[in-house]
């Protein structure tokens, strides 16, 4: 199932995890507060029953993420985007994507980067390179509508995913970003 949009798409599971995060942080009142910042057409779509495996316009997700950051963390919106990514990883990896977790082995999860990417995005690809016993580099190529905010959600997602895989004190840096003119996005992951 594909809903209308510009062609850049994201799975409904991402939208669902964002709405669940809002419910956890203030119930339906918080959901209504955030949705009230969005255009009426976005509000109508997000108030319907979303399908986790359906494709939705990426622009909808970007607008929702911005509204969430404005409400949850107006003084540090970057932190809000990281928390959204962490919440998404928690929900997906403790649910339908639990097969990507192997206790004590973050490299197993990271080595599945190309497959995991397809659960979220319709365009582009992600690669994995093991750089040490407790480090790796992920690279994203040809993604559409790259924004620094979306990249921060990716940082948060992988931070939480490494924790769920047994990695301690994960640190993710993002030294190259297409939103800043780089040819691809790069995420350096390490943990104790």
Image (cartoon, rainbow, N blue to C red):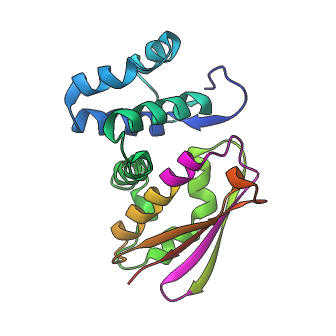
- Is 35 on the left or on the right of 121, as rendered? left
Give the vertical position of 74 relative to 165 (above or below): above
Give the vertical position of 140 relative to 52 (above or below): below
The residue lying toward the viewer, choosing from 192 and 121, is 192
- Is 98 on the left or on the right of 133, as rendered? left
Quadrant in which the N terminus is drawn = top right
Magenta region:
132-153
- Give the residue at the far bottom of this rendering: 133
Residue 73 magenta-drawn? Answer: no
Give the vertical position of 17 relative to 96 (above or below): above
Residue at the spot 23% in from the left edge and 22% down from the top edge: 29
State the count of labels: 0
The residue lying toward the viewer, choosing from 171 and 5, is 171
From the top left corner, tell me how far across and down residue 37 is, in percent: 42, 20
Residue at the spot 62% in from the left edge and 49% down from the top edge: 118
Residue at the spot 35% in from the left edge and 69% down from the top edge: 163
From the top left corner, tell me how far across and down residue 175 is, in percent: 62, 68
Give the vertical position of 63 relative to 90 (above or below): above
- Is 145 on the left or on the right of 157, as rendered? right
């Amino acid at each position: 199932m594909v809903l209308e949009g510009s062609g850049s798409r994201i799975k409904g599971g991402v939208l669902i995890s964002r709405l669940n995060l809002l419910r956890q942080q203030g119930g339906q009142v918080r959901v209504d507060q955030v949705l009230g910042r969005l255009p009426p057409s976005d509000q109508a779509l997000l108030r319907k029953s979303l399908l986790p495996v359906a494709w939705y316009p990426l622009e909808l997700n970007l607008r929702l993420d911005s509204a969430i950051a404005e409400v949850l963390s107006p003084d540090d919106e970057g932190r809000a985007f990281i928390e959204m990514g962490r919440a998404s990883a928690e929900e997906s990896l403790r649910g339908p994507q639990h097969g990507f977790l192997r206790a004590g082995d973050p490299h197993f999860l990271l080595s599945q980067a190309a497959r995991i990417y397809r659960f979220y995005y319709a365009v582009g690809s992600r690669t994995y390179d093991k750089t040490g016993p407790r480090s790796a580099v992920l690279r994203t190529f040809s993604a559409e509508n790259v924004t620094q905010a979306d990249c921060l959600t990716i940082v948060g997602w992988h931070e939480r995913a490494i924790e769920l895989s047994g990695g301690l004190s994960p640190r993710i840096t993002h030294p190259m970003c297409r939103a800043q003119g780089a040819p691809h996005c790069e995420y350096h992951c390490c943990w104790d």
